[in-house]
Amino acid sequence: MAVLFVLLLLAVSAATADEDAFIGVNIGTELSDMPHPTQVVALLKAQQIRHVRLYDADRGMLIALANSGIQVIVSIPNEQLLGIGQSNSTAANWVSQNIVAHYPATNITAICVGSEVLTTLPNAAKVLVNALKYINSALVASNLDRQIKVSTPLSSSIILDSFPPSQAFFNSSWNSVLVPMLEFLQSSGSYLMLNIYPYYDYMQANGVIPLDYALFEPLSPEKEAVDSNTLLHYSNVFDAVVDATYAAMASLNFTNTQVVVTETGWPSKGDSNEPDATLENANTYNSNLIRRVLNKTGTPKRPGLAVSTFIYELYNEDKKPGPVSEKNWGLFDVNGVPIYIMHLTDSGNVLANDTTNQTYCAAMEGADKKMLQAALDWACGPGRVDCSPLLQGQPCYEPDNVASHATFAFDAYYHKMGKAADACDFNGVATITTTDPSHGSCVFLESLGKNGSTLANVTAPTLNSTSLDSSASDFRSGAFTSIAIMMLLICLKLMQF
Ligand SMILES: *[C@@H]1O[C@H](CO)[C@@H](O)[C@H](O)[C@H]1NC(C)=O
Ligand SMILES: *[C@@H]1O[C@H](CO)[C@@H](O)[C@H](O)[C@H]1NC(C)=O
Ligand SMILES: *[C@@H]1O[C@H](CO)[C@@H](O)[C@H](O)[C@H]1NC(C)=O
Ligand SMILES: *[C@@H]1O[C@H](CO)[C@@H](O)[C@H](O)[C@H]1NC(C)=O
Ligand SMILES: *[C@@H]1O[C@H](CO)[C@@H](O)[C@H](O)[C@H]1NC(C)=O
Ligand SMILES: *[C@@H]1O[C@H](CO)[C@@H](O)[C@H](O)[C@H]1NC(C)=O
Ligand SMILES: *[C@@H]1O[C@H](CO)[C@@H](O)[C@H](O)[C@H]1NC(C)=O
Ligand SMILES: *[C@@H]1O[C@H](CO)[C@@H](O)[C@H](O)[C@H]1NC(C)=O
Ligand SMILES: *[C@@H]1O[C@H](CO)[C@@H](O)[C@H](O)[C@H]1NC(C)=O
Ligand SMILES: CC(=O)N[C@H]1CO[C@H](CO)[C@@H](O)[C@@H]1O
């Protein structure tokens, strides 16, 4: 019992080392008309998306993301993995060109070394751990290893017998890679990156998994899945897979490494044999997911400890090969128009608003500078716009020219006046536009405060929630396990869907 107690304490301290949980978005680029990086960043800002993952280290995107307040995970594509895993100096070059050149202006927080390597590129598996280590050594050499974590997204399909979650383990044919990988993640303070697709689990289960269980919808108690060891009740696939992953790591004696979900989502459209890829289901899945992460719901094993999660994905990717669903995982179309408006009332500003009909008021191109200055003075004076963000050192000071400052003041006034068309005139030097004038950390928020400054909410806390100290609840569920095993003998409750 004493040993059990010590183990529990260890587990608890690991759990409480948790950091803030957040929602991020993956940015795939297989679009026939990929928006320019500045348009991508304008959309991210308008939607208050503060965490993104890129599938490469595209220079244009990294430059556009500079000084944006957005945290960025970059990736080494699988095609480059063999080279990097076989050569320390190739890895060092990659880091210097793609990371050192952009940090800290671009807030790179992690590097994904390959993607689902074990399941999609098994012949590169033997160099995967070396690649992780080489990239990390290069970060150490640049003194960036504390700020930037190194990991590799795994497919949840390498976890076998994921129900009941408490008995899950990794496919042991990968242990020769997974054990050193987990050692690396633990010793470098990194996290396990996991891709979870309840949509595919649901599709492949041939009716065994109810749709509501995949979509986080409320279930009647008899439909909940009960872990026969812990007696914990599972009401969705996502939680079961996350808890199974912690159990699989624990079965290899790794209990200090957190899970970050690098991909999850639901397609909004599919072929005739994909009837559940619908707008309504995609909306339900992603809305429920976001609400749960931001509400710190956590999993049955770790209530209150939300798992940071990146939604797959920002745009529909029309050039993706495969079934129709492959092209329809996006939250937005190529023009930044939402595919569906999520049900996110009371979940803050993230992704909560439609940008379809956004309009802004901007200084007219080529307008007379003196007239612009007079209009600017009027807006900040009698017009009662809060022009403090234009002061030196404030977010909208740069670029320090009259047109840029006037655009800020005109737009603030226009919104204050409820976007009445005649509020965007200023003696003919202003014009209504659909282009978001946001730049750098000067963010024009369309839908906020009809009569206040457009910047009113920029400093408000957004997509991030501080994890609760859940030592008490973790303790409870941990101790519960041993009681549960005894109870199991008395009350044999079968797993049921
Ligand atoms: C990057 O994001 C981290 C996490 O929020 C923050 O602590 C850090 O200050 C940011 N770095 C820069 C350079 O903005
Ligand atoms: C790789 O290079 C780093 C310096 O960039 C060095 O510290 C490390 O020892 C090297 N590792 C190997 C295995 O050669
Ligand atoms: C485990 O992984 C091996 C190697 O990829 C694969 O051949 C095998 O089918 C997997 N086992 C299961 C049960 O999925
Ligand atoms: C985990 O640790 C226990 C106790 O120290 C040991 O008996 C077991 O063999 C270890 N398992 C693995 C997979 O290393
Ligand atoms: C947040 O979680 C609590 C406890 O699980 C729940 O009662 C509450 O309804 C949730 N709130 C939202 C907005 O989802
Ligand atoms: C955008 O404006 C058009 C025309 O005024 C209107 O028909 C449409 O419903 C609006 N779209 C949204 C999502 O509000
Ligand atoms: C800022 O955002 C919060 C939360 O969405 C909202 O309640 C508040 O009204 C907003 N403030 C302004 C000035 O728009
Ligand atoms: C803003 O508008 C609301 C109603 O829309 C009103 O109650 C409030 O007084 C206005 N605030 C200012 C500062 O004008
Ligand atoms: C989360 O928000 C708090 C303020 O509410 C802030 O102090 C903290 O730095 C934020 N963390 C991240 C990761 O953005
Ligand atoms: C969270 C948020 O800002 N929601 C707003 C989205 O837009 C609608 C309509 O413009 C507002 O009513 C919501 O408050």
Image (cartoon, grey):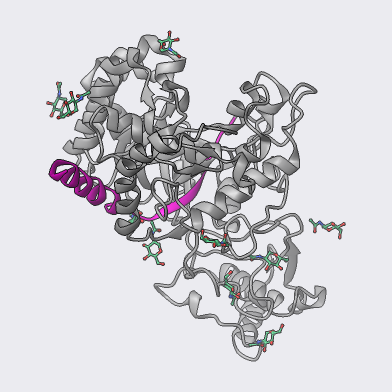
* Residue 303 locus on image (x, y percent): 42, 52
Magenta span: 1-29
Quarter of the image where the N terminus is located: top left
Depth order, front residue of 311/175? 175
Residue 226 seen by the camera = yes
Quadrant assignment, res 465: bottom left
Quarter of the image where the C terminus is located: top right
* Residue 412 locus on image (x, y percent): 64, 75
Is 166 on the left-hand or right-hand side of 454? left
User: Which residue is depicted at the point 49% across and 80% down?
Assistant: 388
Is residue 2 found inside the magenta-colored segment of the image? yes
* Residue 182 locus on image (x, y percent): 26, 29
**Residue sticking out furthest to the bottom:** 382
Depth order, front residue of 442/275? 275
Depth order, front residue of 457/204? 204
Image height of 486 relative to 15, above or below: above
* Residue 33 locus on image (x, y percent): 68, 33
Depth order, front residue of 254/444? 254
